[in-house]
Amino acid sequence: MPDHSMDTNAKRFKSPFRKLAYFFEESRNRWKSKYKQIKSNVKRLENKNRYLKKRNTQLKEKVKNLESELNQIGVKEKQLQLIVEKKNGRERCIL
């Protein structure tokens, strides 16, 4: 195995170690910042997706309720029309 002592590292890197350490630290900080931002965006989108699914379910339920109510109103309207027609038919018979 080759000997990786300080002498060989000094030959590999031309920049001083303090500058390399600073560079690597800044690179790590940029990566962490980018990762945190992406993570927060993912979390926000997950929350939005959950909210929209819940809202979609609520709206579908509301539509079903309104359709049911509309059908009931239509049945009542037909019953009232029959009552009116019967009354009109009786009045015609009386006259």
Image (cartoon, rainbow, N blue to C red):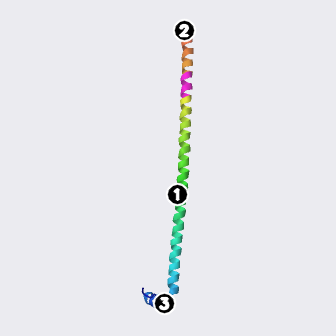
Look at the image and tell me in which quarter the N terminus lies: bottom left
Residue 83 at least partly seen: yes
* Disc 3 packing (10 Å; few <14; some 14–19; many ≥20): few
Residue at disc 3, secondary structure: helix
CA separation, marks 1 and 3? 49 Å
Q: Residue at x 55, y 47 (%)?
A: 55
* Disc 2 packing (10 Å; few <14; some 14–19; many ≥20): few
Quarter of image, res 3: bottom left
Q: Residue at x 47, y 87 (%)?
A: 15
Q: Which mark is first along the chain, 3 or 1?
A: 3
Residue under numbered circle 3: 6
Residue under numbered circle 2: 93
Residue under numbered circle 1: 45
Vertical arrangement, residue 5 with respect to residue 91, above or below: below
Residue numbers of the magenta segment: 73-79
Name which residue type carries label 1.
Leu
Q: Which mark is first along the chain, 2 or 3?
A: 3
Vertical arrangement, residue 62 with respect to residue 43, above or below: above
CA separation, marks 2 and 1? 71 Å
Name which residue type carries label 2.
Cys
Q: Is residue 85 magenta?
A: no
Magenta region, main secondary structure: helix
Vertical arrangement, residue 11 with respect to residue 55, above or below: below
Q: Nearer the viewer, mark 1 or mark 3?
A: 3
Q: Nearer the viewer, mark 3 or mark 2?
A: 3
Q: Residue at x 53, y 86 (%)?
A: 18
